[in-house]
Amino acid sequence: MSIISKVPLADGVSVCLFGAYGTLFDISAALSRLGGDLGDKTGPLTSLWRNRQSEQARKANQMAEYENFWYLIGRGLDEVMAELKLDNPVLRAKLLDCFLDPELYPDVKGVLTALSERNVKTAILSNGAPFMLTSAVTNSGIQDLLKQLISVDPARHYLPHPSVYQLAVDELNSQAGRICFLSADSGDVAAASDFGLQAVWINRLGRQWELPSAPPVHEISTLAELSALLPA
């Protein structure tokens, strides 16, 4: 049975591999910048758009019909804006720009800096297209704190498909068990653990773990708690 592991990570972690959106980057906070344009539709659009992205990525994996993430989120946004009766091309561009210039969670820079000081390699594994990731890390000022940005594009599948984790292992030139994968997405974390990565769920919202059949994972409520999991 799956459990939330209470013990430290195993020895030998040489890479901390982070999800991007929702893990390092707070897209909801970025969207809230447009509250003046969206008004009372800010909340519904944020929720609907996030759910649409997940649905479309899952369908793409099931059907083996990969499309660039930028196109996927744009198509999802068009559908949601139509549902909410928002016909505004300028607003559409601003909404998409939230993925290129996102808000950074406040605990990110300190943790990345601390990992660098411990000689632990840091990288991103994300559904985002390469140009999206480059833009996001540059605009948020963490480009010098990350050694690699790994997009799912070469695998032509989205997280949590096993080929994506294999891509990360290959790109990082590391054994799976020496990679610590951290994400706010419980499904991605469970799949990473099943693949053989050491997996950490960043549960900022205090949710219940709902995947009882998944392999054990670790849980933290903020990235600042990561240091306690790492072997001395």
Image (cartoon, rainbow, N blue to C red):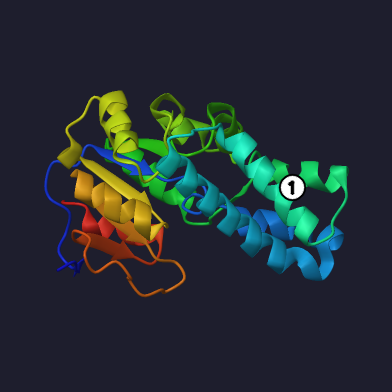
> Which kind of residue does numbered mark 1 sit on?
Asp
Question: Residue at 22% of width from left, 37% of height from top?
Answer: 14
Q: Nearer the viewer, residue 199 or 92?
A: 92
Question: Residue at 64% of width from left, 61% of height from top?
Answer: 48
Horizontal side of 93 relative to 118 (left or right) equals right
Q: Nearer the viewer, residue 6 or 68?
A: 68
Q: Residue furthest left?
A: 11
Residue 187, above or below 130: below
Question: Residue at 33% of width from left, 59% of height from top?
Answer: 201
How many numbered marks does the figure carry?
1
Quarter containing the N terminus: bottom left
Horizontal side of 207 relative to 232 (left or right) equals right
Could one spot residue 221 in this view of the protein? yes
Residue 215, above or below 97: below
> In which quarter of the view is residue 71 placed?
top right
Can you identify the residue that label 1 sits on? 78
Q: Nearer the viewer, residue 90 or 24?
A: 90
Residue 102, above or below 69: below
Residue 13 picture location, percent across and down: 19, 42
